[in-house]
Amino acid sequence: MKSFKKGFLVLAVLFSIDFIFSIFNSQTKHEFFFWEIDILFYRLYKLILAAIFIALYFCDNKSKQNK
């Protein structure tokens, strides 16, 4: 389970970095799995995934402390 915890943290950091870099990008469309989508939906997708992985990391951390 320790590898999952580190994996959640790594994925959270990667998605957060990608979200931050997308803010400074001036494009209005992004190609996502062969479809072009609006950059705002892409940013929202990255932000939600980063938040999910951060929440999973802290939930796993909290459950380890309670044991």
Image (spheres, rainbow, N blue to C red):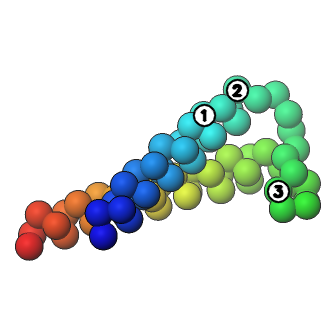
Q: Is residue 10 left or right of residue 57?
A: right
Q: Which mark is residue 20?
A: 1
* Residue picked out by circle 2: 24
- Marks 1 and 2: in contact by CB < 8 Å? yes
- Marks 1 and 3: in contact by CB < 8 Å? no
Residue 55 visible here: no
Q: Residue placed at 82% from the left, 56% from the top?
A: 32
Question: Which quadrant of the figure has residue 23?
Answer: top right
Q: Residue placed at 30% from the left, 70% from the top?
A: 1
Q: Earlier in the sequence, mark 2 or mark 3?
A: 2
Q: Is residue 27 left or right of residue 45?
A: right
Tell me how far mark 2 sits from mark 1, CA to CA: 7 Å
Tell me how far mark 2 sits from mark 3, CA to CA: 18 Å
Circle 1: residue type: Ile
Tell me residue 67's x, y (percent). Answer: 8, 73
Instruction: Check disc 3 and report its element: helix, strand or loop.
Output: strand
Instruction: Check disc 2 and report its element: helix, strand or loop.
Output: loop
Tell me residue 24's x, y (percent). Answer: 70, 26
Question: Which quadrant of the figure has residue 4?
Answer: bottom left
Tell me residue 37's x, y (percent). Answer: 85, 54
Neighbourhood count class around disc 3 (C-alpha, 10 Å): few under 14, some 14–19, many 20 upward: few
Circle 3: residue type: Phe
Q: Residue placed at 23% from the left, 60% from the top?
A: 61
Q: Residue placed at 79% from the left, 45% from the top?
A: 39
Neighbourhood count class around disc 2 (C-alpha, 10 Å): few under 14, some 14–19, many 20 upward: few
* Residue picked out by circle 3: 32
